[in-house]
């Protein structure tokens, strides 16, 4: 039986009553009008299913909000609409196949002008169903924060939103169980520029591992599908970012 991983998110931020907005699948932050700020990169093939959404307030008579999983910028079949006096909805019928290096995010669309000023709190969840019995996802993003081309910075591997920090201890996460971290994918919002590059390295207990990705020149993404790192419960992990030859300030996921 394949592993099923729960992806949870939520935010205390009023939903827009007239415009489409976007958010992360995992974690959550203020809803954004630009979808590119909300992408997270999938590192392993599988299926996403069982979408559940809860709202603090109902849309109101004749109005609704529709929540849809987006894959590589396109609407998937995994979607639910919450209408009228309802405050929750789900889609337990559809499932969506994803591949390594796909990017995903959540879309919210209002219809018939839901009551303004309402729904200040939202929660959502869905499940990633891996093709094998051992793989789960680590989903991270720098959200709206540009990488500093002059500094060594650190970022938590999973979730957010958080700015990169020059202090690694501010950005570590604790591993709850033993396993192996592999298949490291990074995407940038643009290219670093001619001769310039960013390097991202998985760190364990304050030391670099062999899991690393360098993105340079005109490239906008990279991966390390060769190296892996064993971890045990209690290990602390982070992602380090270094820069070379003054790359452009970009955002990473």
Image (spheres, rainbow, N blue to C red):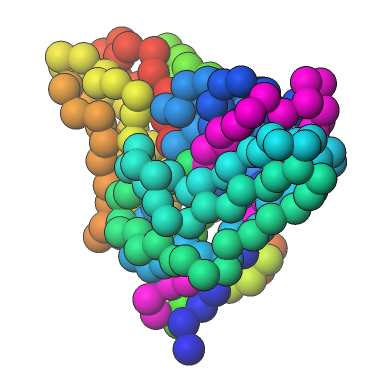
Q: Along the line of sight, which residue is nearer the eye, 56 or 62?
A: 62
Q: Position of residue 161 (x, y in %)?
A: 63, 32
Residue at 82%, 28% (x, y): give it.
Answer: 118
Which quadrant of the figure contains the C terminus?
A: top left
Please provide percent x and percent y for residue 45. 34, 65
Task: Report x, y in % for residue 156.
Answer: 59, 40
Count of marks placed on residues: 0
Query: Which residue is at the front of the view, 99 or 135?
Result: 99
Magenta range: 106-132
**Residue for point 75% across, 53% down:** 88
Q: Is residue 56 magenta?
A: no
In this orientation, does residue 139 appear? Answer: no
- Is residue 57 in view? yes
Q: Position of residue 185 (x, y in %)?
A: 34, 47
**Would you identify the image quadrant in which residue 17 lies?**
top right
Give the residue at x 29% y 21%.
Answer: 190
Q: Quadrant of residue 111?
A: top right
Position of residue 130 relative to residue 143, above or below, is below
Q: Dividing the picture into quarters, in which one does residue 64 lie?
A: top right
**Is the residue 177 above or below the residue 141 in the image?**
below
Q: Is 77 on the left-hand or right-hand side of 30? A: left
Please tell me which residue is depicted at 32% across the width and 12% down the height of the picture. Answer: 248
Between 215 and 191, the one lying in front of the other is 191
- Most distant residue in the front direction: 62
Q: Is residue 117 magenta?
A: yes
Q: Is residue 195 above or below residue 201?
A: above
């Amino acid at each position: 039986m394949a592993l099923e991983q729960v992806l949870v998110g939520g935010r205390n931020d009023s939903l827009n009553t007239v415009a489409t907005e976007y958010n992360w699948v995992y974690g959550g932050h203020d809803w954004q009008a630009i979808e590119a700020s909300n992408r997270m990169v999938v590192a392993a093939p599988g299926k996403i299913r069982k979408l559940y959404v809860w709202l603090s307030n109902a849309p109101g008579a004749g109005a609704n909000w529709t929540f849809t999983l987006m894959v590589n910028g396109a609407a998937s079949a995994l979607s639910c609409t919450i209408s009228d006096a309802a405050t929750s909805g789900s889609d337990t019928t559809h499932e969506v196949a994803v591949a390594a290096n796909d990017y995903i995010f959540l879309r919210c669309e209002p219809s018939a002008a839901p009551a303004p000023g309402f729904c200040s709190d939202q929660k959502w969840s869905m499940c990633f169903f891996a093709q094998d019995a051992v793989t789960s996802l680590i989903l991270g993003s720098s959200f709206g924060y540009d990488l500093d081309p002059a500094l060594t910075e650190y970022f938590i591997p999973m979730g957010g939103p958080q700015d990169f920090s020059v202090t690694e201890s501010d950005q570590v996460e604790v591993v709850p169980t033993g396993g192996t971290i592999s298949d490291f994918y990074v995407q940038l919002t643009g290219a670093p520029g001619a001769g310039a590059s960013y390097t991202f390295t998985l760190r364990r207990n304050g030391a670099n591992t062999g899991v690393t990705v360098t993105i340079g020149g005109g490239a906008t993404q990279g991966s390390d599908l060769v190296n892996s790192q064993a971890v045990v419960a209690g290990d602390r992990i982070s992602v380090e970012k270094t820069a070379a030859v003054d790359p452009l300030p970009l955002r990473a996921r």
